[in-house]
Structures are given as structure tokens and as C-alpha cells.
Image (spheres, rainbow, N blue to C red):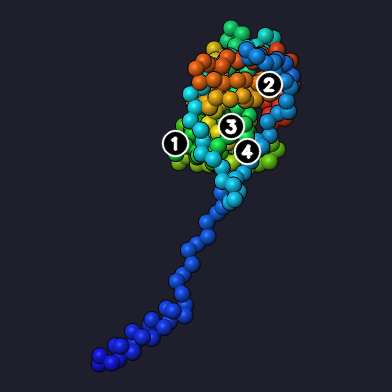
Amino acid sequence: MHRRDLASLSALALSALALAGCPEEPSRPSGGTAATATTAASVEKPAAAPQGSEAPKATAQEAAPAAPAGKGIIKGVVKFTGKPVEMKVPTARKDAPVCQDKDVLYNAVVVNDGKLKDTFVRIAVGGVPGSWKAPDAHAVVDQQDCMYVPRIQGVVSEQQVDIKNSDRTLHNVHTYKGSETLFNQAQPGGAAPLTKAWKDGIIKLTCDVHPWMRGFVVVTDHPFFAVSGDDGSFTIEKVPAGKYKLEAWHPHHGLKTADVTVADDKPAQVTFTYAGTEPEPAENKDELKGLW
């Protein structure tokens, strides 16, 4: 090809680029029931059951501030003063292959020495200023001995949750938010985990094959939550100093709240008390109906 031909082609190419312009960069999304608990300076107030409401969203004009660093600690205990429901082995379990191999007591209400296990405690949704990113680590729910393990846990909004099946039998992971089915999927024993994430709410996990199975994942817009242990105690760490509304939610006995003031230099102490007469929360009606 002659030199004048190459020059002509170069000129044509430059003209085409000038007319077309550079491709645009893809647009980016904009920022987007009744009883008492006490603290050193406050008394519990009744509140409606948590509905998984969202924290206020940041707009493009007013982005959410960075999450503050905290040194405060909230420590407490969940007490139980009444007579707990007696936990038994679900009747249907005794006729289910694999599940019948172990007599596992149900775990809806577990009380040890007047202390209530598996109560989810958190600062109320939207109660902590700042923007909180979901941790990279996945939370895990396992199906072991035909039960969901753990019974209840918390995650940060949009945190990944791996649902596993360690049993030698088929389970059916049927999840609800309120009365709405989120997904319903069979999972054979040893199958790959089902990985899910939710923005908000109390997520209830059930099994259509084994109707006694039940678990809960509570989604919050910040990481300041805990679950009471065998001794009813809980600890929430790295809390920014300030005044907060604290919520305690038990899947069988519902919600209680308390006001708490957190300082950097001394743990805030909180006690929640259940009498055992509280109605079942709307998110988990009739769990024990027909189990034995």
C-alpha cells in the first residue's frame, strides 16, 4: 500500500472517532409484649414486634456518614420468672427416617436456672448513626439431627448466609418473612450450601418434610446485636457512646425493649425479664401446635 493511501486511511479513522466520541462510562447507583426490662436509669416500654424496618437511606446529595468507631459495651441477662413450656421430642420425629435415630428434645423455650436462652438482643434498626457494610464472612445455618443450628442468629443487612444440610436425609428449606414465602427449595443431604442474603426482617426457616424444624435469621442494618447463651447472658461490644433503644426478641415470647446509655469507660448493664405469659409474636405463631 502506498504512503498516501495510509495517510488517507488514518485521516478517515480520526474523523470517525471525532464524530462518534468516546463510549460513555456505565452509570453507577446512587448512595444509596409487655413486661419489664431495666437499666441503671430506665424502665422498659412496650413496643410493637420488630417488622424489619429499614434504616433511613442515604441519597446522592446526602451520603451516609462513615460508621463511627466505638468502645462501649452492653452486657446483660435475660431472666425467666414463670413456668416454661415443657419441651418434648416431637411425635412426628419418631416416624421419620434418619430423624428417628435420635430423641432430640425440641428447643423453642430453653430455661436454665431462671435464665432464658436464644433471645435475640439488638440496638433497634436505624438506631445507630452511620453506614455499616456487611462483613465478608458468611453466616452459617446447618441442618443437624433434623434441627436448624443455630436456632437463632443475627446478620448485617445483605450479609451472605450459607444454609447447609449435614443430615443423611432430604430437607426442604422453606423460608418466610412474615407470611410471605421468600424461597422454597429441596436440599438433599450433603448437597452444596444454599447461599442467600436479605436486606431486612426476621427470616423464619422451616422444613416441609420435617414440620418441627424451625430457625431464625434476624437481619439488622448494623452489627450491634447478640443472642443470649445457656445462662441467659449476652454481650454487645464496640458500641459508639450514646443513648439507644435496645430490643430483646424471643421467637416464642416476643419483644421487650429498654432504654440504655452507653459510655466508653463503663459497660452498660441491662436485664430483660419474661414471665412466660407473653403471647407468641406475629412472626412465629403456633410453633408448638400439634408437635406432641
Indicate which disc, 1 or 2, sits on the residue closer to the N terminus.
Answer: 1
| Amino acid bearing label 3 | Val
- Distance between the Cα atoms at labels 4 and 2? 20 Å
Task: Give how far across and how far down residue 104 sits, in percent.
Answer: 55, 19
**Residue found at x 49% / y 27%:** 70
Disc 3 to disc 4, how far (Cα)? 9 Å
| The label number, if any, that marks residue 256 in the structure image | 2
Determine whether 109 is above or below 23 in the image: above
Give how far across and how far down residue 264 sits, in percent. Answer: 50, 21
Q: Using residue 279 as the reference point, say whether residue 26 is left or right of it.
A: left
The three-letter amino acid code for the residue at tag 1 is: Ala
Per the model, the C-alpha gap separating discs 3 and 1 is: 22 Å
CB contact under 8 Å: marks 4 and 2: no
- Decide: few, some or many residues near mark 1? Use Cα within 10 Å; few <14, some 14-19, many ≥20: few
What numbered label is drawn on residue 55?
A: 4
Cα distance in 3D space between marks 4 and 1: 22 Å
For badge 4, the amino acid type reads Ala
Q: Earlier in the sequence, mark 3 or mark 4?
A: 4
* Foreground residue among 103 and 69: 69
